[in-house]
Amino acid sequence: MAKVTVDGIEVEVPNGATVLQACEAAGKEIPRFCYHERLSVAGNCRMCLVEVEKAPKPVASCAYPVADGMVVKTDSPVVRNARRGVMEFLLINHPLDCPICDQGGECDLQDQAVGYGMDHSRYREAKRAVKDKYVGPLIKTIMTRCIQCTRCVRFAAEVAGVPELGATGRGESMEIGTYVEKALTTELSGNLIDICPVGALTSRPYAFVARPWELRKTESIDVQDATGTNIRIDTRGPEVLRILPRINEDVNEEWMADRGRFSFDGLKRKRLDRPWIRVNGGLRQASWPEAFAAIAGKLKGMRGERIGAIAGDLVEAESLFALKALMAKLGSENLDCRTDGAAIDVTRPDFYRFNTTIAGIEEADALLIIGSNPRTEAPVINARIRKRWVAGRFPVGRIGPAGIDLTYGHEHLGEGPEAIRALLDGSHPFMEVLKTAKRPMVLLGRGALMRADGLAVLAAAWEVARQADALREDWHGFNLLHLFGGQVGALALGFLPGAGGQDIGQMLGGGADALWLLGADGVDPATIPAGTFVIYQGHHGDRIAGHADVILPGAAYTEKDGTWLNTEGRVQRGHLAVYPPGEAREDWRIIRAASEALGATLPFDSLAALRDAMALEQGLERRFAADATGPAGDPAAMSGAAFVLPLANYHQADVIARASDVMAQCAATYAAPVPVAAE
Amino acid sequence: MSFAQPTHFAFDDSSEAEIAKILAKYPEAKKASGVIPLLYVVQRQMGRSTGSAWVPKVAMDVIAERLGMAPIRVYEVATFYFMFNMKPIGRHHLQLCGTTPCMLRGSDDVMRACHDAAHVQVGQTSADGLFTLTEVECLGACVNAPVLQVDDDYFEDLDYDRTVALIEALKRGEKPTPGSSIGRQTSAPEGGPLTLIDVAGGE
């Protein structure tokens, strides 16, 4: 530890810390542009100059290591003058176009110019102008505003792992860009907007939409992947205008994936905003009482075992709990939440969770990925894996389709279960890598379980973890990576066939006369037997809604107070940012109201009462593997079929993204679009 | 960019021989250090094979692959140094120093000679494709000012007439002798030694 005196305040910081960190420890704010705590130090903006006693001139505090007994002044006349000089130089080539700049109001340069800028310019020569660059459909560039802090260059190379941005040219002709025009190939590109301290990189969908002070900010959780990214939803009136990540060191640090960030325009399209009922083969608009009457007319008197409920991938815990309770009242045990057909063993929570935890990835020292591409399934988790890999000594093996760029080096062990077998019988050397590792991780993709021998794959992956000694009292190295924000909540609440109940295959195979589909957009309409009475409750008129007999318009995740569990099993709450459109209502209320119409009134009248009954504690208690007994399933039963990745198209993987114009543009830019059913 | 980028580039045999020598200087893990020498190899090969010594984009991609680095890192280096021509140039690259010592010693005359004899303006390539003229900052040969760099060679102590003669020789495809155009030995004083002449013989 080094003792440093900052403006008369004595602080102790670790050796190797920078002067800037010491100043922050002393509670002094240091202005900066290029420095970012999650990126490497560049030291090129010079805004963080401080005076260090005995140093001949001001030093850039972000790049200057502390020494014991150092005396630092952060607010002396020398410092203020030096920073004023830096600011004057930065503003020489910066257009003063704040009134038409989208960064205005939340711009580091604007804020710091208030503190250190002059009230006039002494610069009389021509300002430089830089051509704007195309870097994809999500980011708008106004490169004349760039102050060349190189944060974006470092983010792309270090965090996102796609070294495609760079600074070309030199001196006055230095420009940030890709040199060859191309869209950045990363699922984390939105973060470039956040880290850009000026208005050079701004959000294309949000261009000229609003000023930050007009926005109402609501904290919520991203449900469009299973990371559980903490987000802030910015709204004005009834409209979601943008979504930004919040800092949560345990989950997303401060990053966010593009699909969650940019697909919110899908919340305005193809929405179900009033109930519909099928009359004489055609759907017609209806009122809520009519819709409930139509349901009651069918369901009342039907035997419980002929009624089924299927939940989708984005549903929050409250409505799952309410629907499960309603089904119990109706005497049905036919519940399922695995619309993708994944074979999951829920007898113990650690069979279906990301037990190492996301932050725990940084403690691991070897990783085996089975049947997953975390880069598209959970980009933020992939960035965490990359962070660990960059730190060094982190062998990664992957079993799955060949030719996938994870943004970090890895060994491709095989395409299918035969590679797991080779690990289990010790014939593949990577098993030795896992065994010698002190904290090995096995990451099993949910996609690897969406097959007939899913349970066998699950058991085999567990067995690999067990043999690698990853299941210990001080470490849990078995991880299941889910795809969407509602999946773990449904498993945790047991939205699964009860005693004697039918699973999704049996329900669709003629075992049910009535199906309640709660946001179950993953169900293929063609698989529903003719004559089945279908109630669809959800927020988007996706392919399944057109096949429903009654449509109950629900709320999207931005429109309700909800609880979601991420792939770790972390319980997090999101809040209502805007009201659902038209007649649509929060989903648990719909179920509560329907229960009354069905004569099976549920015992909770408020969200608080429902949450009391549900008893899900917020947060996550990290658990280790006290019990290494594996899930049901016989590893020997694995077929020879190669693993197929579940998300063919990252940008259009869920119902909100499929309705989004921005995501459609991304899909057109980055991949061949999936054919949309012609309904 | 109003010129065509080639779609293909491969090192020829003599370039490969040079590359082997260059990469031998660096440890395998640090072979990215060879990026500048390799850019020169590309530029020289382009000069040999097309008569225009420049670095096309596809060649930078080839270098990136050879050195195991991201293409953008090669673009950054290549665009930083103006010694690398990012667009096609003439057969001969005339780089005229216009910094103070050369300017005082008559670089303006040399410039005029380039205009008149090579028919080329600064930053442009002559219509016959023989010359590209660039005005550069100090070439570090002030003692023999004014200096004109033709491709890799310095021509020093120039004036209008000698520059015209030099350019005419280049046009004829000759290879003029580099160095001082007034017979000065390297950078020794003009007209022979001026000091220690009274102690001739070293007595």
Image (cartoon, rainbow, N blue to C red):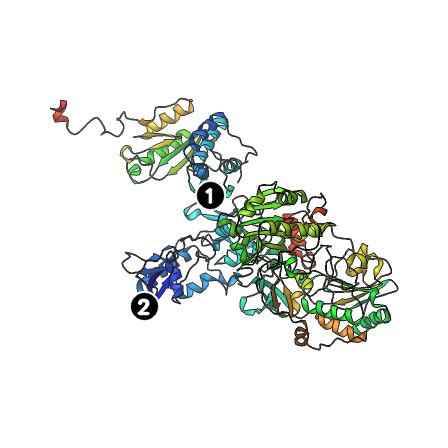
Examine the rendered structure and indicate whether residue B163 appears above or below residue A139.
above
Give percent across and percent down for residue A527.
Answer: 81, 55
- Regarding residue A131, the answer to whether it shows in the image is no
Q: Amino acid at mark 2?
A: Gly
Q: Quadrant of residue A507?
A: bottom right
Residue A383 in sight: yes
- Of all chains, the one bearing label 1 is B
Task: In this rendered view, identify the residue nearer to me: A64 or A505.
Answer: A505
Q: Is residue A129 positioned above or below A215 on the image? A: above
Q: Tell me the chain of label 2.
A: A
- Answer yes or no: are tags 1 and 2 on the same subunit: no
Q: Confirm or deny contact between disc 1 and disc 2 (CB under 8 A).
A: no
Quarter assignment of residue B7: top right
Residue in the foreground of this view, choosing between A116 and A3: A3
| Quarter the N terminus of chain A occupies | bottom left
Q: Is residue B120 above or below residue A365?
A: above
SS state under label 2: loop
Q: Callout 1: helix, strand or loop? A: helix
Residue placed at 48% from the left, 58% from the top? A198
Q: Which mark is residue A584?
A: none
Q: Is residue A180 left or right of residue B182?
A: right
Disc 2 designates what residue? A8
Q: Residues within 10 Å of mark 1 (few under 14, many from 20)?
A: many
Residue designated by label 1: B76
Nearer the camera: disc 1 or disc 2: 2
Q: Is residue A621 left or right of residue A520?
A: left
